[in-house]
Image (cartoon, coloured by chain):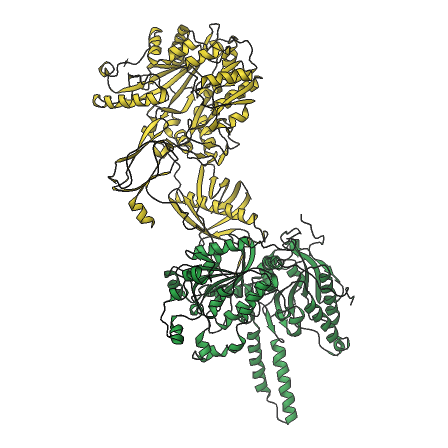
Chain colours: A yellow, B green
Amino acid sequence: MTDRIDTLLVANRGEIARRIFRTAHEMGIRCVAVYAEADAAAPFVADADEAVLLHVGYLDGAAIIEAALATGAQAVHPGYGFLSENAGFATDVEAAGLCWVGPSPEVISTMGDKLAAKQAAVEAGMPTLPSSDDPTRADDVGFPLLVKAAAGGGGKGMRIVESADALADAVAAARREARSGFGDDTVFLERYVAKSRHVEIQILGDNHGNLVHLGERECSIQRRHQKIIEESPSPIVDAAMRTRMGEAALKLASAIGYRSAGTVEFLVDDTSHEFWFLEVNTRLQVEHPVTEMVTGIDLVREQIRVATGEPLGYDQDEISFTGHAIEARLYAEDPSHEFLPAIGTLHAYEPATTPVVRWDTGVGEGSVVGVEFDPMLAKVIASAPTRVEAAQRLALALERFHLGGVVTNRDFLAAVLRSPEFLTGDTTTDFIHRVGPARHRELDSDEMARFTVAASMWVQAHNHAHAVVLPNVRSGFVLGRIPPQRITWEVGDDTITVHYRSRRDGSFVFGVDAENGQAIIHGWSADHIDIEWQGLRRRYRVTRHDRTIYLSDGRGTAELHQVPRFVVPGTDAPTGGLVAPMPGVVLEVRVVPGDVVIAGQTLVVIEAMKMEHHMNAPSDGVVAEVRVAEGDQVDNGELLIVFESDLEEES
Amino acid sequence: MTRVHLAPPLASRVDTGSEAFVKNRSDMLEQLDEIEQLLDEANGGGGPKAMDRLRSRGKMPIRERIFNVLDPDTPFLEISALAAYKSDYALGGGMVVGVGIIAGTECVIMGNDPTVLAGALTPYAGKLWMRALEIARDNRIPYINFVESAGGDLRVQAGDGDSKRRRVEILHFAETGRFFYEMIELSKLHIPTVCITFGSSTAGGAYQPGLSDYNIVVKEKSKIFLAGPPLVKMATGEESDAETLGGAQMHAEVSGTGDYFAEDEMDAIRMCREVVSHLNWRKPGPGPTFTPDEPTHDPEELLGLVSRDLRRPVDVRDVIARVTDGSRFEEFKARYGTTMICGWSTIHGYPVGILGNNGVIYPDSAQKATHFIQLCNQVDIPLVFLQNITGYMVGKDFERDGMIKKGSQMINAVANSTVPHLTVIIGSSYGAGTYGMSGRAFGNRFTFLWPTAKIAVMGPKQIAGVMSQVRRAQAARKGIEFDEEEDAAIVAMVESIQEKGSLALRATGAISDDGIIDPRDTRTVLGMCLSVVRNREIEGAEGYGVFRL
């Protein structure tokens, strides 16, 4: 036990490292970061007072402890994920004479084993779902059921099984994922509640036996079994239910001697409001900020205080809940393609100044998003006196966010928050499937025209401002006759050409033979354009990178690719073929050039985010070229296989 | 760093509600509308059928080729867009010439219009071509050739065209071909010449690539030969196809006539831009060094200043106030020789000396102009002439006052001035006044007309009147009775013919200027010209100090 911490090592990366640094710095504590090579340029490394490179990675506990000792840190905060729930690591930290910011290794160990945790919960009188640790004994559980990895979390190694005949395959798949994800292929079966909510209780304890709960968080909105929107309080939890759940959670915590911050997760039946124990997370949760915002308690500060032996200093009666907070997790992923992870460079990344919301972000403009780590970019948290206000505020903050370069779930999050179902609190775990919020913002022809006009005018203004000669003469002035100015844009799958001419009054007319609109530029700079089009004036935040322009109009960000006027012959990319739908590693290549393949046949297997994805032939054909080999790292959109028909079309 | 010319803005008041203004404006708009329609016609080149045929062969019209070579959103100044007006040739004369910006470099671009007589050289195209070469040489800007030309118009040379067409053929073949000499001259003066051969380029046309510094040929499209297959067969009996005889590939790989081998037209245009971008073109002078603020008086009001019949006097300061930066004007000798307005200002940030007419030139106004031109030459400031001049004053008193002598001083000063001259004819331009105010014959860099311009040896009324007096004198000498009625008819006819012949459209059709501009664009056009002239060192005349006259 350390009684004073002046230097803290955070054994984590990204937004959570920065978030912990923030509180530590406010407490006067110097911060040490550890980072993997791929994170050398990450903002969290710059935020720390000192940083130590981890040659192997964030799971190298020995190197982390060595770094702590070398930098004079007295304590290690594990954040979430990585080694945060690794009892062995916690033990090693304490054995090295360092303070572990978290629960005791014994508690981590017990709660980390889902079956042991469940046993402890049963002993503490908690209701639990029927389950079996023998994956063949489905009858003890009943259908539908879930196959879950004992060492799992975050939806990995999890399968829903509707009937007995699908059981064997699901168990096999879950085992495979569990083995690759956690190095342990133990799985168990658990009853699946179709219409359910995910509600969890935040608990906080010290070394003196004091325990409080900080109310609940509802995290029912999930995709691929991962939470994307969390809130506190839950729309279905009233004071009485909160007390019941809180007391149940504290009873378990007390029974196992819990200290520091933790979370007791429950499954709640949406209809009956019955709740069942799921598991205990012995760490700071990703979604902890919503609790902080309604309770006013800084959970990282409490963790650090408790770790040094300080008593909590307050009891349950002193905990109060004010307003409503909602968090959205911004992911680099493509909602339109099964939320597969996306990569790229964040060329545009700038939150709007209003509405004021909390940004826990691990990246910034220019950050490269790769496949090495979890694709969560940021958490955005809004609080307001009412739930609807908080939801709208969060939605607007997301919509006004200038964000481009990487495909994200931003539009999707905003669509969820704006949906009537969400606003009325109808949030069950099947929400996304049931409600089907728009996966991406669809631009109608009018909005498309606005974006292409705004982008064209920005390019025009840029060209004019950077003119080498005649910078003051009217843009594109013509004495005599030559065709109007022309820019071709690719927006999604659409190709749009706009034509315009300047007029003496400084405005621009669009169209070739007939005028089809007038644009007036009210203001322009390298990063914005304020433009009036068809009587409506809008201000766009603008970023250009190479030939791509990102324009944010307060409803999202459009990405327009300017088609170059000239193409150097021989430099155009080959078209067609089989391309990787996401970044990943090639596990298997099943064809060689010359193979005749039929539509649907698996040609390449890619592993991404620890899941296998089968790349199937789009149609019958003959393989002309195989451009990847096993073990290759491939990027989103990278060409894997070329078919002979593509070559013919090219020539 | 920009400086502000300290002169105050002109106080110019134009009554836009007056009957005269309203009438002038509507007349002007009517004339501008006619010009717009003519420009549309010129834009159509050899007509829709020829355009369709061109496109069907995967080719771009000449104006599209030019558009594509220019930097996006930069201005383009077409020269004599209405060449061949009222002639038997397609409006525009089968060639497009203009000044535009390629890779940040001001260039003059000359392009054959293959939809007009397959790009064959009409007399108008020949004159335009010479003008393009002159612009390149005088201003030291790169010369870009977009060639697709059948060569000379054989029908004219052979004389089997219709008689009207032969009438415009005023040069004997022996006198033609100066453009080739001029192209070589440019190269000698280190003014780069770049050529894209887009199509067939025969005989004379073949020398355009042949004599250029840089030569871009287009795969399967360029055909460059002294003689096409038919003439070769006539001359030597040799059978050949065009591709073997002068195709792009042959010239790029065998003859070495082509330096760059382009896949298609756009590729050739891309290469042309790359060539210009390597030319290392540097303008010697400072860029615009003064604040280029817009005039405080609305240029829209320029539409109503000049009457169609030119009878109403115009205060040229009202024009200046709508052209110069911040409407500023520092008037020189404001109380002397008041029919000649002289003074300094800036246009688009470039310093200029402006001379404008407020009536006929008197001996004192001529001397004032002479003095002013010398001052501008002392400090290397370009001159802008705003012509609205009926001529130098005639009459006993003025002859005695040395009108000829003082007028000659002024013409001498104009001719020997070595700073660039830019001339805008806003109204009349008659007689020696045309020369004295730096007309086309006096080596100015650019001449533009307002639609109201009239250019002739003298006013139509004066010509008709003078001729009538001569007839009357002849009749008296011969003792014949003078037929007043007949004379009145002749006077009316002469006046009408002269009036038509003096109109801006006729002048511009003959390529005696660089084109008609909308008065509202005067500032823009002058600004472009002031930038273009700065590709060459501006050096005023040397030799003597300023004579105070």
Q: Is residue A46 above or below residue A512?
A: above
Q: Quadrant of residue A72?
A: top right
Between residue B344 and residue B300, name the one nearer to us.
Answer: B344
Q: Is residue B390 left or right of residue A366?
A: right
Q: Position of residue B37 (x, y in %)?
A: 48, 64
Q: Position of residue A180 (x, y in %)?
A: 34, 23
Task: Specify whether residue B374 is in view.
Answer: yes
Task: Specify whether residue A237 is in view.
Answer: no
Q: Is residue A304 above or below residue A352?
A: above
Between residue B378 and residue A537, name the one nearer to us.
Answer: B378
Q: Position of residue A150 (x, y in %)?
A: 33, 16
Name the residue: 51% across, 70% down: B126
Q: Identify the residue at the far left of this view.
A: A165
Q: Is residue A592 left or right of residue A211?
A: left
Between residue A6 and residue A176, name the one nearer to us.
Answer: A176
Q: Quadrant of residue B532?
A: bottom right
Q: Identify the residue at the far bottom of this view.
A: B479
Q: Is residue A343 above or below residue A167?
A: below
Q: Position of residue B466 (x, y in %)?
A: 64, 82
